[in-house]
Image (tube, rainbow, N blue to C red):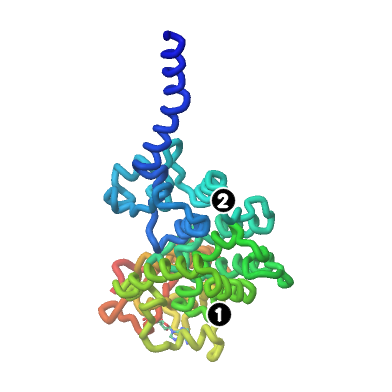
């Protein structure tokens, strides 16, 4: 009798309890939660994996960070101190990084496409994307610099295009199949596609035609058209970008909505070389030349080659921090040069607007020296 009872007890422990706990698990809260918003490109990479593998929402539920009050709330920051998306919360670990989330999903959910986690070309494309594209992608939608290590949008956009060309060169032009590494989808497709939606839709806003290089453009069009998961993710991301548009996001962003409406000045003719000037410095961004009507033995004008809406200093914004720094640093360097007529000191002047007697509506820094200057100026 005792033996029988003991057997029953151990049967309950070893068979029924584990079954019951499995059952409870699948019937209760989802195993994991992906905090993400449709417009997030790195989140969309994880969604491509979820959708392609048809992982049920009972297993991985997609939630908005707004469910916890937003990215900067103590509740969210406790889960992800970086305050960013996407974030996968599982019962064993919180993963706040999209490639790691994707690899976790691939190793946890084995059925369906395997996304070629060991394909070197796929991994190289994803890695270049993560190291050199994601880090500066803010130049496509953020209002003001810096964009990663770049202080101007034009420098960041130039770098972005360079990195896309490097990725384009990695794509085999002889490949068969619609995906980046052939006929099977890979992590490179999931990684690159959402970001390319941003590039294709937003780079033209900043004056770049043919935003995508040729092999990427062909792949982007094909995969979006022929793979329903990519179509779905395209619609999700585009929906987010469209809502930025309708909320007037671009109106105050330099080049996207905000344009330099002021007429050209004589300085544009000096920049283009249409009229001569005594140029003493040209580094591609800043031009310095001798003032035609010198007010001191040494009198230079230091100007931005791209006016960027700076017909006067009072139009400057955070967008101009980099160029304003360059102008002053250049002025200081030139004022050290005795061959330009400077002695022990200089005066830096910016005349701004009618009260200060500004004549040319293109920001310029006067650098005066070669004699002692009186104070206060008139
Ligand atoms: P501002 O009064 O501060 O607008 O200064 C404009 C400055 O541009 C004046 O000092 C002018 O002498 C100078 N300027 C105008 N045209 C030329 C030119 N073609 N080459 C060099 N300096 C010029």
Write the residue at 53% across / 81% down.
209
Task: Measuring from the top left, give residue 139's x and y in whole percent.
Answer: 46, 66
Between 98 and 179, the one nearer to me in the picture: 179
Write the residue at 46% across / 22% down.
11
Task: Measuring from the top left, give residue 265's x and y in whole percent.
Answer: 42, 87
Q: Is residue 358 above or below residue 158?
A: below
Considering every residue shown, the one lying at the far right of the view is: 174
Camera sees residue 377: yes
Write the residue at 52% across / 83% down.
271
Residue occupied by mark 2: 111
Residue occupied by mark 1: 210
Task: Measuring from the top left, give residue 326's x and y in whole percent.
Answer: 48, 65
Q: Quadrant of the N terminus?
A: top left
Marks 2/1: CA–CA distance: 38 Å
Q: Secondary structure at mark 2?
A: loop
**Picture disc at residue 325:** none
Q: Give the crowd class for mark 2: few <14, some 14-19, many >=20 residues within 10 Å.
A: few
Left or right: residue 199 versus residue 240 is right
Camera sees residue 313: no
Give the foreground label among 2 and 1.
Answer: 2
Q: Is residue 13 above or below residue 209?
A: above
């Amino acid at each position: 009798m005792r033996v029988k009872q003991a057997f029953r007890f151990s049967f309950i422990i070893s068979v029924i309890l584990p079954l019951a706990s499995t059952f409870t698990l699948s019937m209760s809260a989802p195993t994991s939660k992906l905090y993400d918003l449709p417009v997030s490109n790195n989140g969309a990479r994880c969604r491509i994996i979820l959708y392609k593998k048809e992982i049920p929402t009972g297993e991985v539920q997609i939630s908005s960070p707004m469910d916890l009050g937003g990215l900067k709330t103590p509740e969210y920051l406790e889960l992800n101190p970086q305050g960013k998306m996407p974030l996968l919360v599982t019962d064993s670990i919180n993963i706040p990084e999209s490639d790691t989330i994707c690899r976790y999903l691939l190793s946890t959910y084995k059925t369906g496409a395997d996304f070629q986690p060991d394909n070197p070309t796929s991994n190289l494309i994803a890695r270049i994307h993560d190291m050199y594209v994601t880090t500066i992608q803010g130049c496509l939608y953020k209002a003001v610099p810096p964009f990663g290590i770049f202080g101007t949008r034009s420098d960041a956009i130039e770098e972005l295009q360079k990195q896309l060309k490097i990725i384009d060169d990695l794509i085999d032009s002889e490949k068969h199949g619609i995906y980046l590494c052939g006929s099977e989808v890979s992590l490179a497709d999931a990684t690159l596609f959402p970001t390319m939606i941003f590039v294709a839709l937003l780079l033209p806003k900043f004056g770049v035609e043919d935003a995508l290089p040729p092999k990427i453009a062909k792949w982007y069009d094909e995969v979006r058209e022929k793979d329903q998961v990519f179509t779905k993710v395209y619609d999700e991301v585009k929906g987010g970008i469209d809502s930025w548009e309708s909320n007037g996001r671009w109106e105050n962003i330099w080049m996207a909505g905000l344009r330099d409406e002021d007429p050209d000045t004589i300085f544009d003719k000096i920049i283009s070389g249409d009229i001569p000037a005594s140029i003493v410095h040209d580094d591609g961004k800043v031009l310095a030349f001798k003032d035609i009507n010198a007010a001191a033995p040494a009198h230079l004008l230091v100007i931005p080659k791209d006016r960027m809406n700076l017909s006067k200093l009072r139009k400057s914004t955070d967008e101009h921090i980099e160029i304003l720094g360059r102008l002053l640093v250049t002025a200081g360097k030139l004022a050290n040069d005795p061959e330009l007529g400077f002695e022990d000191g200089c005066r830096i002047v910016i005349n701004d607007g009618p009260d200060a007697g500004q004549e040319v509506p293109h920001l310029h820094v006067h650098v005066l020296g070669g004699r002692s200057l009186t104070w206060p100026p008139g």
